[in-house]
Image: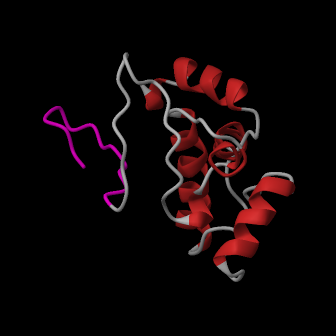
């Protein structure tokens, strides 16, 4: 999606949920399992920080051609996401890009929320 000022935003039009100041969290468990954040899988509530995880997975998909765990059936991928360390971007990419992906793929939503507030690309 492209905004009027030329900013490009990523979006998944398959399943969405709008968060507002009155409903900052959701208990929805829907979406593509390969991009699903660990807190969506393991807890009853999640917020927009789950989208940061999905962004990190999308970065890996754009560089590798497939998301992590794409060879696994959906339920096995869900279990792996919940119980394994986060995936890493492998290959000859800049340290800053690898760091960005690593920051997106934090299993602790509190660390992800701090990235949301400090990264100018996510504002």
User: Which SS does the magenta portion mostly show?
Assistant: loop
Where are the magenta residues, as a range?
Answer: 1-13
Residue extending furthest left? 4
As drawn, is 116 to the left or to the right of 75? left
Percent of width and height locating residue 114: 63, 20
Task: Tell me what residue is drawn at x 47 percent, y 24 percent.
Answer: 120
Percent of width and height locating residue 84: 86, 57
Percent of width and height locating residue 76: 75, 74
Percent of width and height locating residue 32: 51, 65
As drawn, is 38 to the left or to the right of 3? right
Task: Tell me what residue is drawn at x 56 percent, y 18 percent.
Answer: 118
Vertical placement of 28 versus 77: above or below?
A: above
As drawn, is 35 to the left or to the right of 75? left
Q: Place residue 39 in its image quadrant.
A: top right
Query: Which residue occupies the foreground of this view, 82 or 69?
Result: 82
Query: Which residue occupies the foreground of this view, 70 or 78?
Result: 78
Vertical placement of 21 versus 98: above or below?
A: above
Residue extending furthest right? 84
Query: In the rendered structure, does residue 20 fall within the stretch colored magenta?
Result: no
Q: Do we see residue 91 in this rendering?
A: no
Q: Place residue 113 in its image quadrant.
A: top right
Vertical placement of 85 versus 68: above or below?
A: above
Q: Place residue 79 in its image quadrant.
A: bottom right
Task: Tell me what residue is drawn at x 69 percent, y 73 percent.
Answer: 75
Q: Do we see residue 95 in this rendering?
A: yes
Query: In the rendered structure, does residue 3 fall within the stretch colored magenta?
Result: yes
Task: Tell me what residue is drawn at x 76 percent, y 33 percent.
Answer: 108
């Amino acid at each position: 999606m492209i905004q009027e000022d030329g900013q490009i935003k990523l979006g998944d039009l398959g399943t969405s949920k709008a968060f507002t100041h009155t409903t900052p969290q959701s208990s929805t468990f829907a979406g593509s399992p390969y991009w699903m954040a660990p807190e969506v899988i393991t807890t009853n509530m999640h917020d927009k920080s789950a989208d940061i995880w999905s962004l990190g997975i999308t970065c890996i998909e754009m560089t590798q051609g497939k998301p992590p765990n794409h060879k696994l059936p959906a339920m096995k991928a869900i279990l792996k996401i919940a119980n394994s360390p986060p995936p890493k971007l492998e290959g000859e990419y800049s340290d800053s890009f690898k760091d960005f992906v690593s920051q997106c793929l934090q299993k602790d939503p509190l660390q992800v929320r701090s990235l949301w507030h400090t990264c100018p690309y996510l504002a």
